[in-house]
C-alpha cells in the first residue's frame, strides 16, 4: 500500500529544501520511554540536517488536533504513535490526503495500512508484553502483579494484558500514583505484605522498578522484579541481581527510524518496509548482557 | 438609561465609550487579542484558516465547560467531577451502542439523563450536608473515574471505545456533534458553534434573567441571598445540573468528533476549566465573573497551547511557556481592568 | 411608593383588618448550640399596629425577629400565622406570606449593583416563557426613585452596594422592605446608621405602613424613635420577655428608663456625676434621659 | 483601663500637651475610581479635644476618617502628623503613631474568638525568643473585664465574634480601640447599634480619653451624643467641608438643625404635619428637634 | 480558664470532657479511627507493625505538605506549585551532586534557598498584583514543571536522577532524611518523625503565637486584619515561603528514601494536599482550619489508599473506593463536629 504520489515534489528539490518533520506521540511529558523516542527522533534530525518538531498528548482528541496543526503547518512528514487508532483515523487520513507522508510508530500496527501510512516501526505493547510473559513463565512465575503508574493509560493496560496472556498463572494489575515514588513504593509493599504468594512484580517503567526493588526489600518478600524499559539504576540493579531482567523496546530506534523513514521518502521516494511493519525490539537485558548496555543507558538513549 | 446622573458634581467624568471598558471581560479580551497578534506575527500558520481551525477546535470543548464552570463558580461552588463527566457520558453512549446495540439517539438521551442525575446528586449532597462542594464533587470525581475505568473494562474488555463509526445512525449524530464546515479553507467544527451558543445563552441568563441575579447572589453572600428570599437550594442544584449537562454535551462532541473515547478522557481537565474561568475574571470566592470572560479564558488557553506548538519551541519547555504566557495574560487582564476602572 | 407596587404584590394576601393578630408567638425559644438566645417569649403582631421590641445589646431582639422572618427556625414554642401553627422554613416562605424584613446586618450582596440588590428575589420581568427577561430600566428607575424619596441621592445605581456608605446601604435595605412588604414589616434597628433626616423619613414610612393596615415590628435603641410610632412595647432582657405594654400605660420617660435598665442607668449617671463633676454635660444629658 | 496598658503602649509617644494639633489635614481629597468621595477638606485634631465630624449619609465622613486611620491613602492634599507631611501607608503605621480607630464596619474577623479579635495585631506574649507564646489567660481576662466595664456580659470570650449581636460586636471594637489608643482615638458611629446604657458608657470613655489628653475624632448622627462631648464640630456635605465650628459658637439646637440639613428637615416636619395631622407625635418630635 | 462562666443561665450546660469535642480536629480524628478499625478488622496485615509502617510512610510526605498547605489555606491562599516543588528541590540536589560533584550538604542548602526564593516570588506576586494566588501559583507550577523536565533533560540527558547512592556523604544525608528505624517489627521512616514534628510546630504556631493569630485573621477577613494593624504582606509572604520550605523538606525525604527523583515527581500532588487539608476541616475560603486536622486528613488518605490494596478489592475500582471512603470520612467528620457543637 503505497501512497507516495505526493512525494514527487519532495524529491524534486531535495538539494535546497529544509525538511520539517512532526513527531506526534501519545506519551506523557517526562515519561522515560517517550523521552528516548524523542531523543532518537531529534538525533536523526541532527544527523540528517532536518528539522524535527516533537509534540505529544495522551488524549486522542488533542493528539488529532496536533496532527491537524502539523498538516496546517505544511510539514514534510509526520511520525505518529497510534495508541487509539479510532481517535486518530480522521486526522491521519486527512494528512495522507493532503500529501503528507505518515509513518506510524510504537502502536497502531493493525491500522497503519488502512490509514495510508507508509509503514509502521516498533512493536506493539502487546508483543513486548507477550515476550515478558513468556520469559517469566520460563522462569517459573505463577503469581505476578503488574504495576500501572497511570490509571486508564491505553498502552500500559495493553502491556499488562499481554503479560497475562502468555505467562499463564495469575497476573493482577496494581494502580499506583506515578508522580509520588514514595507512595508507589508503599503501595507495592502493601500488596506484597497482604498477598505473600506473589512471586513476581512487573513494572512498566524503569523508575518504578527501583521503587519495586525497595518495596520487595521492605516487605521481606521473595518476589522477583522484572520491568519494561531501562535506566542506569535499573541496569545496576540487574547487575546486582535485584532485578531479574528488563525488556528494552528500544524506543530510541522507534524515534530514529521514524524520522529516517520520512527522510528517505523525502529525498529518495523510498517506502521502507515495503508496506510491512518493522520491529524495533524487544531486546532483553539480563545479568549477562547488562554491562554492554550500561554506557548507553547512562546517556539516556537506551 | 433613565438613571444617568451626568451632571453630578461628585462624579469625575464619564463617556459612553469608556463605559464599555467597565465590563469584566475587557481585560481578557485585550489579553486574547495580544496573544493572537503575537502568534500571528511570529508563526506562519497561526492566523491562516487551517491554523485557526485547529486552535478553535481545541478551545471549543474546553470553552463550553469553562463557561458552565464559570456559572457554577459565580454561584460559589466548584465541580471537580466536570472533567470525568465528559468521559463518563461518552463511554456510556459508546458502550451502549457498540456492545449492546442500543439505538444511538436513545443512548445519547440515557447518557444525558445519567449526567443530570449525577449533577443533581452533587447539588443535593452539597446543600444537604453543608460540606464544601470541592470535597463532595471530588468524591463524585473519584467514583466516576473508577466507573469509567473498571466499568468499561468489565463491559467491553478494553479501556477505549472502538468501532463507534460502524454503529447505525452514527452519521446522523455526527452531523449534530461531530461535523465540520469548511469556511474559507479552514474546517470549523460543530463544537465551535456549540461553544458560541453556550456562551451566548449563559451570558444572557446571567445578565438578563432572574436566575442570573440569583446565581450572583448565592455566590456573593449565601446567607444574605437566603434572607432576602432567593431560592438558594434550587439555584445551586440547578447550577450543578447545568455543569453536568455541559459535561454531557462535551462528551458527545468528543465522541462524535474523534469517534472514540477513553476511560481516562477528561481526567485532570476539571482544573483547566477552573483555570480558564479564573483567567477570564471569575473570583475563586464566588459572586463575580462572566461567561464571556470564561470563553475568552478558554480561547487564550487554546491559542497558547497550539501557538507554542506552531512556534516549534522545544516540547520539554511547553509547560514553562504555558505558565509564563498565562501569567502574562492574567497580568495584562488585571492591568487593563484597573485602568478601565479609573478611566471610565 | 410607586404604582408598580400593587402589581408586584398581587400574589400576597391583602392586609387584614386593623387589630387582628397576624403573627402570634407562644413561649417561643431559640438555641444556638448550647447558647440559649431566647426563651419563653410570647407576643403578637397586629394589623395596623406598631410593636416595638426593646432591650439591651444581646438581649435577643434580632434572634426574635429572625424567627418571625423565617431566617431561623425556632427551637421551642409555637409560631402562629393567621392563627395557624407554622414553621417558616425559609425567608422566602415568609416573604410569600407578605412578611418583609430589614435585617440588622442588612442582607445585601456587596458585589452586586444597588438595583439588583433592591429587587433580588422579586425581580420585575417582561416577555413570555423562555424569553422572559429582566426589565432593567424599570428596576433602575424604581430603585433610584425610592432611594431619592428617602433623601438618598445616589450617583449611580450600577455601583456595587458594597461601595455605598453605611447609611446608604441601610436605606436600600429599608426601601426594599417597605416596597415589598405587604402585610407585615419587620425592621431591625433600621435607623442605626441614619442621619436625622433619613431617620425622620423612616419613621414616617413606619407610620404610613401602619395606617395602611400593615403590622409593623420595630426594633430600636432610641426611645425618641420608638415612642412616637409605637403602639405596644415588648421588653426583652437576657433572652427573656419582661412583658408587653400598650402605649396607653406608658410615658416617654418610663419607656426611656425601661430601655436603659432603669436603676442601672441612674447609677451610671450618678457615677458620671462623681467622676466628671455634677454639671458635666454628659451627666446632665443622661440624667435628663433617665428622669 | 488595666495596668498592662502602659506596658503595651511603651513604644508609642505620650499624648501631647492639650491644644497642640496632632493631626492636620490640608485640602485633602479622595477618589474611588471616578467617584469623588471627598474634596478640599481641611481641619485639625488637637490633643485634649473632641472633634465631631457631622454630615448626612454618604457625605464622606467614613472616607475622611479612613484617611486619618491609614486605611486609605488620600488622592489630593496633605496630611500632617505632628507637623510633618506624611502618607500613612497602612493602618499599622497609624497604630504605631498611637492612632487607634473604630471603623464603621467594625473590622473584626467573624470566625475568630472574641479575645483573639480584641488583641489582634497587638497580642500579649510571654517567654523569650522562639518560645515566645501568647499569654492566653491574661488576654481572655482583659477582654472579659473591658467588655464587662462597658456593660456587656459575654457568656464566653471563646465564642466566634461573628456570632455576637450587632451591639456586642460594636462594643468589642470600641473597647479595643480605647484600650490601645495612645494619642488619637477615632470613632466612626460607635454608638449606632448600642443601647442607651452602653452609649452612655462610650460617651464617658470619650470624655475620659479627652481628659487624659488624647485627641478624639467622633462621628455620630445623634446630636444628643455629639453636643455634650464635642469641642469642635466639622460639617461635611456631599464630600465638601461646610466649615469647622468651635463649641462656643454653637447651641444644641443649631447643631441639630445643622446635622439635619436645617431647612430640609423643617420642610419634612411640615410635610409630616400635613400628611399625618399637626398633632401627630412624629411631627411633634421632629419639630421639637428642629426648633 | 479564668473566664469560665459556668453559672450563666443563658448557657445550657457544659463539661470539661465535652469541651474537648469543640476542637475542629475531632471530626477528622473520629473518621480516622473508624477507618483504622474498619481496615484492621477486615484485613490481616493492616494493623500489624509492618502494615502500619507502610501506610504511615505513604501518609507522611503527603502529611507534611498538607499541614503547610493548611496553614496557607487558613491564611486564605492556595499554592498549586507545592507539588512540583517537591520534584524541583530533589532534582536540584540530584543534578548538582551527580553531575557537578557539589558537596551533598551544600547542594541541599542551595536547593532550600531556591525553594524559599520561589516561595518569596509567589508571595510577592500575589500581594503586589492582587491576582488570585490560584492563578499566580499555577503559573509558577507550570514554570517549575517545565524546568524540572527540560532543565534536567538538558543538564543530565535523563528524565530521572540516577546513581544518587554513589555520591559522597550520601549516607549522612540519608540518615537525616531517608533512614528507617525498626520499631516493633515495622520500619518507621524518618519522614514519619518529620511529619510529627511539622504538625506539632504548625499547631503551636497557629494556636499559641502572634503569627498564628495573624494567619487566621488574614484568611478570615483580609481588609479587617489590615485595618486593625496586622502586617498582612509579611504574613502572607511568610506563608508562601513556609509552603515552599515544606516542599523542599518533602523533596529531600523523597530523594533520600527512594534515592531517585523523576522530572514529573509531585506533579498533580498539589491537589491531594488541598484535599487532605479540606478533609481535615480547612475551609476553602480561608480563616478556619487546623494543622492537626490536615495531618489527620493525610492519614485518612494514606490509610484508605493502602487499606484498599490490603483488602484485595478489584484494583480497577480503586478510585471509586477512594472516592466513597473519602466522602464517608468527611461526612462522618461533619456529623461528629455538629454533634460536638450542640452537645458541648
Ligand atoms: N449564631 C449564633 N451563635 C451563637 N450565639 C449567637 C448567635 N447569634 C446570636 N447569638 C447570641 O445570642 C444573643 C442574642 O443575640 P441577638 O443578636 O438576638 O441580640 P440583640 O438583642 O439583637 O442585640 P443588639 O441590640 O446588640 O443587636 C447574643 O448574646 C449573641 O451572642
Ligand atoms: N470603595 C468605594 N468605591 C466607590 N465609592 C465609594 C467607596 N466607598 C465609599 N464610596 C462613596 O463615597 C461616598 C462617601 O462615603 P462614606 O462612607 O465616607 O460616607 P459617610 O459620610 O460615612 O456616610 P454614612 O453616614 O452613611 O456612614 C458615598 O456616596 C459612597 O457611595
Ligand atoms: Mg440585634
Ligand atoms: Mg460612614
Image (cartoon, coloured by chain):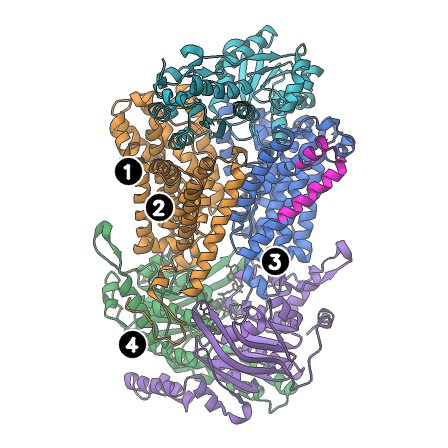
Chain colours: A cyan, B orange, C green, D purple, E blue
Mark 1, Cα crowd under 10 Å, few <14 / some 14-19 / many 20+, is few
The residue lying furthest to the top in this view is A138
Tell which subunit mark 4 falls on.
C
Give the CA distance from mark 3 to mark 2. Answer: 39 Å
Q: Residue at coordinates 21% horizontally, 55% vertically from top-left?
A: C127
Q: Which residue is mark 3?
A: E233
Left/right placement of residue E93 relative to residue B92 reads right
Q: Within 8 Å of ligand 2, the CB of disc 3? A: no
Residue A99: x percent and y percent?
Answer: 35, 24
Tell me the tag on residue C112: none
Give the CA distance from mark 4 to mark 3. Answer: 56 Å
Please, is residue E8 above or below residue B56 in the view? below
Give the CA distance from mark 1 to mark 3. Answer: 53 Å
Q: Residue at coordinates 78% horizontally, 58% vertically from top-left?
A: D128
Tell me the tag on residue B238: 2
| Label 4 vs label 2, nearer the camera | 2
Q: Which residue is mark 4?
A: C211
Residue D29: x percent and y percent?
Answer: 50, 75
| Label 3 vs label 2, nearer the camera | 3
Q: Is residue B127 visible?
A: no
Mark 2, Cα crowd under 10 Å, few <14 / some 14-19 / many 20+, is many
Magenta segment range?
A: E92-119
| Label 1 vs label 3, nearer the camera | 1
Tell which subunit mark 1 falls on.
B
Q: Can you tell which quarter of the image residue D21 is in?
A: bottom right
Query: Secondary structure beneath disc 4?
Result: helix
Tell me the tag on residue B184: 1
Tell which subunit mark 3 falls on.
E
Tell which subunit mark 2 falls on.
B
Query: Secondary structure beneath disc 3?
Result: helix
Amino acid at each position: 500500500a503505497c501512497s507516495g504520489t505526493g512525494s514527487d515534489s519532495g524529491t524534486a528539490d531535495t538539494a535546497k529544501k529544509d525538511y520539517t518533520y512532526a513527531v506526534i506521540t501519545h506519551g506523557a511529558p517526562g515519561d522515560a520511554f517517550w523521552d528516548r523516542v524523542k531523543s532518537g527522533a531529534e538525533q536523526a534530525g541532527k544527523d540528517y540536517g532536518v528539522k524535527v518538531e516533537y509534540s505529544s498528548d495522551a488524549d486522542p482528541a488533542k493528539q488529532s488536533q496536533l496532527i491537524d496543526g502539523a498538516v496546517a503547518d505544511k510539514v514534510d512528514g509526520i511520525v505518529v504513535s497510534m495508541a487509539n487508532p479510532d481517535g486518530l483515523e480522521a486526522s491521519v487520513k486527512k494528512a495522507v490526503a493532503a500529501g503528507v507522508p505518515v509513518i506510524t510508530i510504537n502502536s497502531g500496527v493493525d491500522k497503519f495500512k488502512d490509514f495510508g501510512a507508509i509503514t509502521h516501526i516498533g512493536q506493539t505493547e502487546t508483543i513486548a508484553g507477550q515476550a515478558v510473559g513468556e520469559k517469566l513463565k520460563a522462569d517459573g512465575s505463577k503469581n505476578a502483579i503488574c504495576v500501572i503508574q497511570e490509571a486508564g493509560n491505553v498502552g500500559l493496560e495493553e502491556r499488562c494484558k499481554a503479560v497475562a496472556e502468555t505467562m499463564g498463572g495469575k497476573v493482577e494489575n496494581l494502580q499506583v500514583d506515578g508522580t509520588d515514588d514514595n507512595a508507589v513504593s508503599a503501595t507495592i509493599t502493601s500488596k506484597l505484605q497482604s498477598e505473600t504468594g506473589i512471586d513476581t512484580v512487573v513494572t512498566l517503567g524503569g523508575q518504578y522498578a527501583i521503587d519495586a526493588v525497595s518495596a520487595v526489600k521492605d516487605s521481606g518478600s521473595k518476589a522477583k522484579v522484572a520491568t519494561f524499559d531501562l535506566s542506569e539504576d535499573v541496569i545496576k540493579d540487574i547487575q546486582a541481581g535485584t532485578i531479574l531482567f528488563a525488556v528494552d523496546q528500544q524506543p530510541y530506534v522507534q524515534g530514529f527510524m521514524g524520522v529516517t523513514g520520512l527522510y528517505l521518502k523525502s529525498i529518495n521516494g523510498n517506502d521502507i518496509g515495503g508496506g510491512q511493519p518493522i520491529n524495533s525490539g524487544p531486546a532483553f537485558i539480563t545479568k549477562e548482557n547488562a554491562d554492554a548496555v550500561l554506557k548507553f543507558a547512562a546517556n539516556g538513549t537506551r | 438609561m433613565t438613571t444617568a446622573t451626568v451632571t453630578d458634581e461628585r462624579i469625575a467624568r464619564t463617556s459612553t465609550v469608556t463605559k464599555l471598558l467597565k465590563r469584566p471581560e475587557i481585560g481578557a479580551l485585550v489579553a486574547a487579542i495580544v496573544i493572537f497578534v503575537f502568534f500571528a506575527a511570529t508563526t506562519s500558520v497561526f492566523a491562516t484558516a487551517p491554523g485557526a481551525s485547529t486552535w478553535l477546535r481545541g478551545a471549543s470543548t474546553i470553552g463550553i465547560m469553562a463557561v458552565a464552570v464559570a456559572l457554577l463558580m459565580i454561584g460559589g461552588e466548584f465541580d471537580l467531577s466536570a472533567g470525568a463527566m465528559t468521559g463518563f457520558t461518552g463511554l456510556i453512549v459508546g458502550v451502549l451502542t457498540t456492545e449492546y446495540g442500543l439505538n444511538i439517539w436513545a443512548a445519547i438521551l440515557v447518557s444525558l439523563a445519567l449526567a443530570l442525575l449525577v449533577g443533581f446528586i452533587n447539588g443535593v449532597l452539597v446543600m444537604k450536608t453543608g460540606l464544601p462542594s470541592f470535597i463532595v464533587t471530588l468524591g463524585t470525581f473519584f467514583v466516576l473515574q473508577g466507573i469509567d475505568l473498571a466499568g468499561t473494562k468489565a463491559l467491553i474488555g478494553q479501556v477505549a471505545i472502538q468501532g463507534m463509526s460502524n454503529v447505525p445512525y452514527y452519521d446522523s449524530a455526527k452531523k449534530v456533534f461531530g461535523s465540520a464546515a469548511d469556511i474559507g479553507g479552514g474546517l470549523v467544527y460543530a463544537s465551535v458553534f456549540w461553544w458560541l451558543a453556550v456562551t451566548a445563552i449563559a451570558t444572557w441568563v446571567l445578565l438578563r434573567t432572574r436566575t442570573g441575579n440569583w446565581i450572583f447572589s448565592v455566590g456573593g453572600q449565601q446567607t444574605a441571598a437566603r434572607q432576602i428570599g432567593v431560592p438558594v437550594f434550587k439555584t445551586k442544584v440547578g447550577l450543578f445540573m447545568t455543569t453536568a449537562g455541559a459535561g454531557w454535551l462535551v462528551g458527545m462532541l468528543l465522541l462524535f468528533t474523534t469517534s472514540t473515547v477513553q476511560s481516562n478522557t477528561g481526567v485532570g481537565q476539571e482544573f483547566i476549566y477552573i483555570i480558564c474561568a479564573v483567567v477570564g475574571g471569575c473570583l475563586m470566592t464566588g459572586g463575580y465573573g462572566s461567561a464571556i470572560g470564561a470563553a475568552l479564558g478558554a480561547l487564550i488557553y487554546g491559542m497558547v497551547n497550539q501557538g507554542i506548538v506552531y512556534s516549534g519551541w522545544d516540547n520539554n519547555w511547553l509547560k514553562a511557556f504555558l505558565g509564563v504566557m498565562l501569567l502574562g495574560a492574567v497580568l495584562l487582564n488585571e492591568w487593563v481592568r484597573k485602568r478601565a476602572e479609573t478611566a471610565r | 411608593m410607586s404604582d408598580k407596587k400593587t402589581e408586584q404584590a398581587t400574589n400576597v394576601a391583602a392586609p387584614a383588618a386593623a387589630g387582628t393578630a397576624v403573627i402570634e408567638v407562644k413561649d417561643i425559644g431559640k438555641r444556638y448550640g448550647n447558647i440559649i438566645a431566647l426563651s419563653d417569649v410570647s407576643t403578637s403582631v397586629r394589623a395596623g399596629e406598631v410593636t416595638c421590641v426593646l432591650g439591651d445589646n444581646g438581649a435577643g431582639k434580632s434572634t426574635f425577629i429572625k424567627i418571625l422572618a423565617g431566617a431561623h427556625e425556632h427551637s421551642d414554642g409555637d409560631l402562629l400565622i393567621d392563627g395557624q401553627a407554622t414553621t417558616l422554613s425559609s425567608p422566602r416562605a415568609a416573604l410569600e406570606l407578605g412578611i418583609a424584613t430589614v435585617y440588622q446586618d442588612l442582607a445585601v450582596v456587596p458585589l452586586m449593583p444597588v438595583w439588583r440588590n433592591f429587587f433580588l428575589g422579586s425581580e420585575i420581568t417582561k416577555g413570555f416563557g423562555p424569553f422572559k427577561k429582566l426589565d432593567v430600566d424599570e428596576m433602575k428607575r424604581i430603585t433610584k426613585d425610592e432611594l431619592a424619596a428617602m433623601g438618598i441621592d445616589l450617583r449611580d445605581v450600577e455601583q456595587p452596594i458594597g461601595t455605598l456608605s453605611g447609611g446608604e446601604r441601610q436605606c436600600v435595605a429599608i426601601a426594599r422592605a417597605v416596597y415589598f412588604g405587604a402585610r407585615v414589616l419587620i425592621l431591625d434597628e433600621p435607623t442605626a446608621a441614619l442621619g436625622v433626616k433619613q431617620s425622620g423619613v423612616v419613621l414616617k414610612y413606619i407610620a404610613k405602613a401602619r395606617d395602611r393596615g400593615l403590622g409593623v415590628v420595630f426594633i430600636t435603641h432610641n426611645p425618641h424613635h420608638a415612642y412616637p410610632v409605637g403602639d405596644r412595647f415588648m421588653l426583652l432582657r437576657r433572652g427573656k420577655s419582661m412583658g408587653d405594654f400598650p402605649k396607653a400605660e406608658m410615658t416617654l420617660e418610663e419607656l426611656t428608663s425601661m430601655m436603659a435598665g432603669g436603676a442601672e442607668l441612674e447609677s451610671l449617671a450618678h457615677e458620671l456625676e462623681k467622676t466628671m463633676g455634677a454639671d458635666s454635660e454628659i451627666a446632665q444629658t443622661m440624667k435628663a434621659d433617665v428622669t
